[in-house]
Image: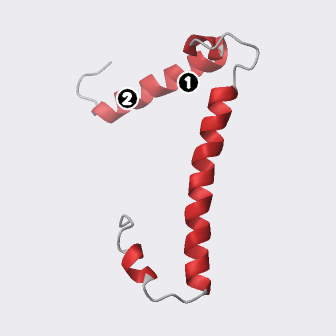
């Protein structure tokens, strides 16, 4: 590998290799050798999707009710 490449490119290659290894070998590499092997991954996914949906719901309710104080909360969000 060329050492002049940005660190992010090397990190992306490692992440891709790790994901491929996970899908080839299975969740047993996490130490999960029980029949319900994907339980942790599914719970983790559902948890973070739920957090995202809650934030969207709260924002939508505040927008529909035309709450003026929500503008101060919007300033906390990262700029794009």
Q: Which residue is mark 2?
A: 11
Q: Residue at x 59, y 18 (%)?
A: 22
Q: Residue at x 37, y 79 (%)?
A: 72
Q: Which residue is mark 1?
A: 19
Figure label count = 2
Could you tell me which secondary element the residue under label 2 belongs to? helix
Comparing 18 with 13, the one in front is 18
Looking at the rendered structure, the secondary structure element under dot 1 is helix
- Quarter of the image with the N terminus is top left
In the displayed structure, 58 sits above or below 50; it is below
Give the quarter of the image for residue 74: bottom left
**Where does the image place residue 68, in percent across and percent down from the top left?**
45, 89
- Left or right, 25 with reference to 75: right
Query: At 51% from the left edge and 87% from the top edge, which residue is drawn?
Result: 67
Q: Of all residues shown, which one is farthest toward the left?
A: 4
Quarter of the view holding residue 2: top left
**Of residues 49 and 24, which is closer to you in this image?**
49
Instruction: Decide if residue 1 is on the left or right side of residue 20.
Output: left
């Amino acid at each position: 590998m060329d050492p002049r490449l940005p660190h992010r490119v090397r990190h992306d290659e490692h992440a891709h290799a790790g994901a491929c290894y996970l899908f080839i070998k299975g969740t047993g590499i996490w130490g999960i050798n029980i029949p319900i092997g994907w339980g942790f991954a599914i719970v983790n996914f559902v948890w973070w999707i739920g957090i995202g949906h809650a934030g969207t719901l709260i924002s939508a309710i505040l927008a529909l009710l035309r709450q003026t104080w929500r503008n101060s909360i919007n300033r906390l969000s990262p700029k794009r």
